[in-house]
Image (cartoon, helix red, strand yellow):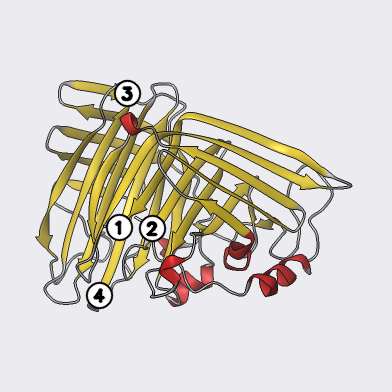
Amino acid sequence: MTPRTPRPNARQASRRKAQASPAPPETSAPGGAGGAGAFEESASPWPDALSARWRGQAGRLEVWYATVSDPLTKSGLWVHHEVVAPDEGEPYVHGWAAIFRAGKQPQLERMAPEPLPAARPATTLPAPRGSALGPLDVTGRAGKLSWDVRLDADATQAPLFTFPAWAWEREALPGAQVLPVPSAACTGTLGAGPEKVELSPQARGNLAHIYGRGSAERWGWLHAELGGGDVLEIVAATSRHAGLDRLPPMPFVQLRLGGHDWPRDPLVAAPLMRCRLGLPDWEVRGSVGRWRIRVSVTIPEESSVAVGYVDPDGSTATCTNSEIADAEIVLEHRRSRWETEHVWTLHHSAHAEVGTRP
C-alpha cells in the first residue's frame, strides 16, 4: 500500500536547489552536512512514528504493515493491517497476510473487516481479530497461515521517512509513509498449513506506517535490506489528481548507509529521479548532487500475490506484491568522474510491489 504523491515541483527549480547544496565529503563513507544531494545523519529516534494518527475523520486510510525476508530459507512474510474510514459509512479495520517460499506458490489469507471500536487502549494499535503487529512482535493466524516473529530492533535506530519528516508530522500531503523500524534482525516461525519454516539468522524485517486519503493512481514500492542495518526504501507514485494522473510515477528515495540518509530531502530530489514502472520488471534511476543511483527490480509472477485494495472513496486498485523479489542497486559517486561506490544484488530477498487501477 502506498500513499499518493503530491504535485511535483518544477524540475528546473528542484535541480537548482539540489545542486546548490554543499557537496558530500570526498570519501568512500557517506556522511557530513549538505543539501538534497548530501547524505544526512539520521534523526534522533521518533517514538510517535508508530502511534495511530486517525482522529475520526471520514475519507482516511491508515496502514501498518510488517515485511520479513530470509535469504537462507528463501521465505518471506507480509502482514498488512489497515483502518478504513470511508467517505460515507462506518470505519472498520481489516487486513491480510501472505507467506512466500521460493519454488512454491505464495499463500494469501484475508482477515475479515470488523467495526472499529470507539474506545481502545491507547497503547494498542487497531488490528483485525487474531493478529497483532508491533512494536517488536508480529504474531497471528489467518486461515491456513500462522506467523510468530520477533523484531530485534536497536532502540537507538531512527525511523526512516520516505517522505519528508515535516510532511508526516504536519499531515501536509495526501499521504505519507514512515518506517518506525527500518531494519531489524528477526527470529521466529512462519506456517502454511502443516509446513513450518524457522527463520534463519539471516532473516531481516521492518515495520512501516502509512496515513493519508488512499492509494496512488499507480505505484511501485521497494524495501531492500543491504546488510548491517543499511536499507533502501523507494515509493514511486502517480497522483490521482486530474491531469497529474497522466504523469509518470515520481520516485521518493531514501537510502540509509552507516546511519546517514540520502537524499537529504526526498521531496526536493523526487523530480530528479526517473521511474519506469511495469511487471515483472521496473526501475528507478537518478542523480542528486554528487551521487547517482540505479535500481532494477524483478517481481516474478510465480513468487507474487495480487491483492485487491479499496480506497475510502470506494475506488479499487490491484497490488502485486512479493517479499522474495530480486533487485540490483548501483550507487555511484562523482569525483573527477563517476565511480561505482556500492553494488548490491538481492535474490529472493527484496520486498517489492506494483500497484495499478482498477
Residue type highlighted by circle 2? Arg
Neighbours of disc 2 within 10 Å: few (<14), some (14-19), many (20+):
many
First in sequence, mark 4 or 3: give its number.
4
Neighbours of disc 4 within 10 Å: few (<14), some (14-19), many (20+):
some
User: Mark 1 — residue?
Assistant: 357
First in sequence, mark 2 or 4: give its number.
4
Measuring from the top left, give residue 207's x and y in whole percent.
Answer: 39, 49
Measuring from the top left, give residue 148's x and y in whole percent.
Answer: 26, 35
Q: Nearer the viewer, residue 233 or 325?
A: 325
User: Mark 2 — residue?
Assistant: 218
| Tag 1 and tag 2, C-beta contact below 8 Å | yes
Q: CA distance from mark 2 to mark 4?
A: 19 Å
Q: CA distance from mark 4 to mark 1?
A: 19 Å
Can residue 156 be seen here? The reply is no
User: Mark 4 — residue?
Assistant: 59
User: Mark 3 — residue?
Assistant: 198
First in sequence, mark 2 or 3: give its number.
3
Q: Residue at x 41, y 68 (%)?
A: 245
